[in-house]
Amino acid sequence: MTTPAFTHTVTERFLRYVVIDTQSDPASSTYPSTGKQKDLGRLLVAELQAMGIGDAHLDQHGYVYATIPANTQKKVPVICFCSHMDTSPDCSGRNVKPQLVRNYRGGDITLPADPAQVIRVAEHPALKDQIGNDIITTDGTTLLGADNKAGVAEIMDAAHALVQNPQIKHGTIKILFTPDEEIGRGVDKVNLKKLGADFAYTIDGESAGTIEDETFSADGVTITIEGVSTHPGFAKGKMEHAIKIAAAIVDRLPKDTCSPETTEGKQGFLHPIGITGALEKATLGFIVRDFTEVGLKEKEVLLEGIVKDVMKGFPRSTYAIEIKEQYRNMKEVIDRHPEIVDYAIEAIRRAGLKPVRSSIRGGTDGSRLSFMGLPCPNIFAGEHAFHSRLEWVSVQDMERAVQTIVHLAMIWEERSNV
């Protein structure tokens, strides 16, 4: 099956979008967490409406909704393509200056504004698959925003292709762009009834050809330590310092396993993400990740065992532990609808790529959407080294992602009953 003919404008779109600062803010209580995310949302709505997608709109919470009507008489499930507009708070997204390395011939890429920032082949082996391609980086002072503006640009370009090529038969296609995914709030305010989709795909993956149908399961753990406060001049035998107790807990964590820096593949971890407090009271924050509920529980039991052991040395102090569910492995839901992944694999093949089915050592909006009733695996967007100044994406990978989305719309129509 040949790829439908249409003009590839995904790079132009991507370069427009990345210069708009859309960083989310985990300390904010507003929704979206930063008003500047709506700047991109308004631009996307204007572009969608200019394509002829009349219902495109931005809601008060920063979500963009749009519908491409069906152009077939078949009864086809409603499919949604979703990407997030925000970029990570981990690295500056202000004043992004994208650089285009044309016809990459191999070797390390030194970023121009900061020669200390080097995308090394030894650390980024995916570069070996990019010989002859055009690679977009930053100047080395900010992240790029390919996570997930590559996905946004790809969905926009695919929408343009579907609208401009009515000979491509498809069912109703929904488009959803979300805010605040990077801080875990990407679907907190989504209106699934208004969206009206049966199945969905996030376009937020890494290497070209990848389809991800499995994520970590995730919990957050908060440990509160109540120490014993006295005047430091008269503290002998009395003071039990809450910060020191918290530090002792962190020090007892496994050194060679069970941490992000010592695990890979299907291995989970315990990860301290914050410590605050004073002499009398301190708080520790952890995230716990594993692909199974059993693995999560084992790590939480391990953590509480460490806490109890440390507390034996501080008999007059107390602790409280709170565990909150964050998201669960979407595979449990997606496996009930195997056609979702099967059709994506076929679409990737039709785009000229070798499909690779894999797991995400993290989560996506699709993790929560799946458990909210909208099964949603993740398709590649081509982004690499996200959340860093070394982030990059190739033009050709983005174009293949556009082709994959268009083919996927076609396949759902082809495989549906009259």
Image (cartoon, helix red, strand yellow):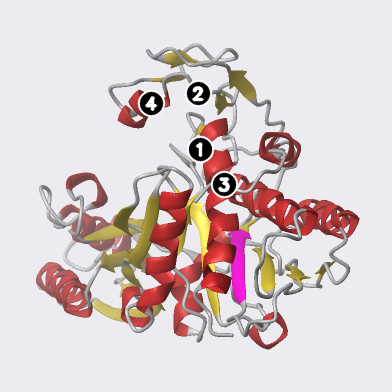
Distance from disc 2 to disc 3, alpha carbons, whole Å, reads: 19 Å
Residue type at mark 1: give it: Asp
Distance from disc 4 to disc 2, alpha carbons, whole Å, reads: 10 Å
Q: Quadrant of the C terminus?
A: bottom right
The reply to whether dot 2 and dot 1 touch (C-beta < 8 Å) is yes
Please say whether residue 279 is one of the residues in the magenta stretch. no
The reply to whether dot 2 and dot 3 touch (C-beta < 8 Å) is no
Residue type at mark 2: give it: Asn
Distance from disc 2 to disc 1, alpha carbons, whole Å, reads: 9 Å
Crowding near the residue tagged with mark 3, few <14, some 14–19, many ≥20 C-alpha atoms within 10 Å: few
Mark 2 sits on what residue?
Answer: 133
Mark 4 sits on what residue?
Answer: 127
Q: Front-most of 9 and 317? A: 9
Who comes first in sequence, dot 4 or dot 1? 4
Mark 1 sits on what residue?
Answer: 397
Q: Residue at x 59, y 31 (%)?
A: 142
Q: Residue at x 59, y 26 (%)?
A: 138
Residue 90, horizontal then vertical, whole percent: 51, 44
Q: Is residue 156 above or below residue 283?
A: above
The reply to whether dot 4 and dot 3 touch (C-beta < 8 Å) is no
Residue type at mark 4: give it: Leu
How many numbered marks, from 0 up? 4
Residue type at mark 3: give it: Thr
Residue 184 shows in the view: no
The reply to whether dot 4 and dot 2 touch (C-beta < 8 Å) is no
Q: Is residue 4 left or right of residue 333?
A: right
Q: Find numbered disc 3 in the image and state the secondary structure of the residue it sits on.
A: loop
Who comes first in sequence, dot 4 or dot 2? 4
